[in-house]
């Protein structure tokens, strides 16, 4: 995209025979616009004046964006109770000057600030490519001056920390959508790839700073569920892994200055820490997407580096929590369990729990440490229940002790509140519910320790659901996944010693919303899942009839 196109946001249209005459298009034109902010419930009546008749609804949206800072991508325009399409032409819908349209939107945006930062990124990208933009621009075309101006004005930092964060703010979410709608993600990824070309050890400090800034923006974009798969498709994960692996970290890694003294790191090391932290944030934000689990788990160097961060005094306990949550989400895919076991991830996370516990007085609080242990135990529970044959026998007793400690000392509701404070938010719960519907199979090893460990793993999974589903936002996600009936049926099918705890999950749901008894079909599916098929198969089948045909084919032989 050219710099000029990005700056003026012009539209190009294919002119039809019915195009109005030039005098008609040039005459002044006005609309009454009723702005309805759906997030705050605000309603405002405004007049919108045009120098010429708009061609289609896109032109109206663009003018609303310019005048009221409401991005076109979040507007829904209604006229006479009909929602209009962007391609609807003004003359074809009989919209006249002086008519009233309704514009529904979630939130305004910081349109001008986002545009300024994006213009600078586009100009910088052109200059790094050796191109001279063929537009009149107040900025210098000298590469060093452009870089210095952007750094001095903190354009990328402002975009990441002021315009895109915190992710819970509606204005910040709208800013992200507006940025992407303008083509900002493509520009960002192009700039990121260019500043990443040079090896870290030979790259100049400005390029390292730009790389860290690109990653910071990307991590805040990735905090939005709607943008995660788009970022993955743009190679955002692959590039962040490459940045994360710039400098091999060693266990106990600590940043130092040029003389080797800890505590006063030089600028290169400070930026390296920023790169590592931004890479962790990107991976943590996208790690629930199953399509990247193989990419993450099969990279042994990445796994080693993640475990090094978890026991590094340079990185606070929050980074260790992010590492544990990345592994927790990767374990949703049984196909990667062998990779995780070969990389000794269980041993590494248990070591991190011990290390952070010893350093707790200086770096963290008891609840910080408990959250790290919680993520670690939920990760281990998935391996125990799904892939017990991969577990090293020498670790079983140690895993048993750590799980029992969590269950004896942790409060699921306290962890839920702390997760909310730390802005940990999950977007999928199927992997946890399906653990409780694994079909009954005899223990293959005959190990008493493994049998006890499997029982504790079920309790840890129930603990996880109690904590997570106590949040209304998480309950909505679980309902959208079609899991409500299966969660309500869960206490009937778990082992007897944990039925009372499973009932607490249902009580947590009932505390926030009235529950209805599950349908007979759901009860039957839940039974079939637990006894025969597992939840994956049952949910994917369109009809319960197909399950019975598979179970009892002789009864369905056509006569």
Image (tube, grey):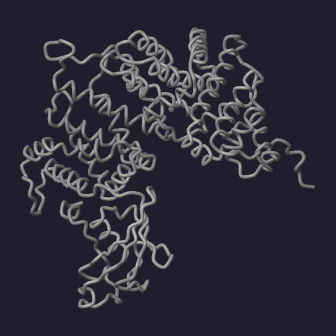
- Residue 421 lies, in percent from the top left, at 44, 33
Locate the C terminus by quadrant. bottom right
Depth check: give the residue in front, 543 or 97.
Answer: 97
The relative height of residue 137 versus residue 340 in the rendered view (above or below) is below
Q: Residue at x 69, y 42 (%)?
A: 537
Tell me which corner region of the image, top left, top right, bottom left or bottom right, holds residue 496.
top right
Residue 127 picture location, percent across and down = 13, 50
Q: Vertical placement of 93 versus 394: above or below?
A: below
Judge from the rendering whether residue 84 lies leftward or rightward of residue 519; answer left or right. Answer: left
519 horizontally vs 364: left or right: right
Left or right of 234 in this view: 332: right
Viewer-proximal residue among 559 and 312: 312
Residue 501 lies in quadrant: top right
**Looking at the image, residue 12 lies above or below residue 185:** below
Residue at coordinates 36% horizontally, 77% vertically from top-left?
A: 32
Give above or below for 95 relative to 214.
below
Residue 72, image quadrant: bottom left
Q: Quadrant of the N terminus?
A: bottom left
Q: Is residue 516 left or right of residue 81?
A: right
Q: Position of residue 551 (x, y in %)?
A: 82, 41
- Name the residue furthest right: 559
At x 43% / y 32%, what residue is drawn?
A: 422
Q: How many marks?
A: 0
Residue 486 point in image, percent of width and height:
71, 40
């Amino acid at each position: 995209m050219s710099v000029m196109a990005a700056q003026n946001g012009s539209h190009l249209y294919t002119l039809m025979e019915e195009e109005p005459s030039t005098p008609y298009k040039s005459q002044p034109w006005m609309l009454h616009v009723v702005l309805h902010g759906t997030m705050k419930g605000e309603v405002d009546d405004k007049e919108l004046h045009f120098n010429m008749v708009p061609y289609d609804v896109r032109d109206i949206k663009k003018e609303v964006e310019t005048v009221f800072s409401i991005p076109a991508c979040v507007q829904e325009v209604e006229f006479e109770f009909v929602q209009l399409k962007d391609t609807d032409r003004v003359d074809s819908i009989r919209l006249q000057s002086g008519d009233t349209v309704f514009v529904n939107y979630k939130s305004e945006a910081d349109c001008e600030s986002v545009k300024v930062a994006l213009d600078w990124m586009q100009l910088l990208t052109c200059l790094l490519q050796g191109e001279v933009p063929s537009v009149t621009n107040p900025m210098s075309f000298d590469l060093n001056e452009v870089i210095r101006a952007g750094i001095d004005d903190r354009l990328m930092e402002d975009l990441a920390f002021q315009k895109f964060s915190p992710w819970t703010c509606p204005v910040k979410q709208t800013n992200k959508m507006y940025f992407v709608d303008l083509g900002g993600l493509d520009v960002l990824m192009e700039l990121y790839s260019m500043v990443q070309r040079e090896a870290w050890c030979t790259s100049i400090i400005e390029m390292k700073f730009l790389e860290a800034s690109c990653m910071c923006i990307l991590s805040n974009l990735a905090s939005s569920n709607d943008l995660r798969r788009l970022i993955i498709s743009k190679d955002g994960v692959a590039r962040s892994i490459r940045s994360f692996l710039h400098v091999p970290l060693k266990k106990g890694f600590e940043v130092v200055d040029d003389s080797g003294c800890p505590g006063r790191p030089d600028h290169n090391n400070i930026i390296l820490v920023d790169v590592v932290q931004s890479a962790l944030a990107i991976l943590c934000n996208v790690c629930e997407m199953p399509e990247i689990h193989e990419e993450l788990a099969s990279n042994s160097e990445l796994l080693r580096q993640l475990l090094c961060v978890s026991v590094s005094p340079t990185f606070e306990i929050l980074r260790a929590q992010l590492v544990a949550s990345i592994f927790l989400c990767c374990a949703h895919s049984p196909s990667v369990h062998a990779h995780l076991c070969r990389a000794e991830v269980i041993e590494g996370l248990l070591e991190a729990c011990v290390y952070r516990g010893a350093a707790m007085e200086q770096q963290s609080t008891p609840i910080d440490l408990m959250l790290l242990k919680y993520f670690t135990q939920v990760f281990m529970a998935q391996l125990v229940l799904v892939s017990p044959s991969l577990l090293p026998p020498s670790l079983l007793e140690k895993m048993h002790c750590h799980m029992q400690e969590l269950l004896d000392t942790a409060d699921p509701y306290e962890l839920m509140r702390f997760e909310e404070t730390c802005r940990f938010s999950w977007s999928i719960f199927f992997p946890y519910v399906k653990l409780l519907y694994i079909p009954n199979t005899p223990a293959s090893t005959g190990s008493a320790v493994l049998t006890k460990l499997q029982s504790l793993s079920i309790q840890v999974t129930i603990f996880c659901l109690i904590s997570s589903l106590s949040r209304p936002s998480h309950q909505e996600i679980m309902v959208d996944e079609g899991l409500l009936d299966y969660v309500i049926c869960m206490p009937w099918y778990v082992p007897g010693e944990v039925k009372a705890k499973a009932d607490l999950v249902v009580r947590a749901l009932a505390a926030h919303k009235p529950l209805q008894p599950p349908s007979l079909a759901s009860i039957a599916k839940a039974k079939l899942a637990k006894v025969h098929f597992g939840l994956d198969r049952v949910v994917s089948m369109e009809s319960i009839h197909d399950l019975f045909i598979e179970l009892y084919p002789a009864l369905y032989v056509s006569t």
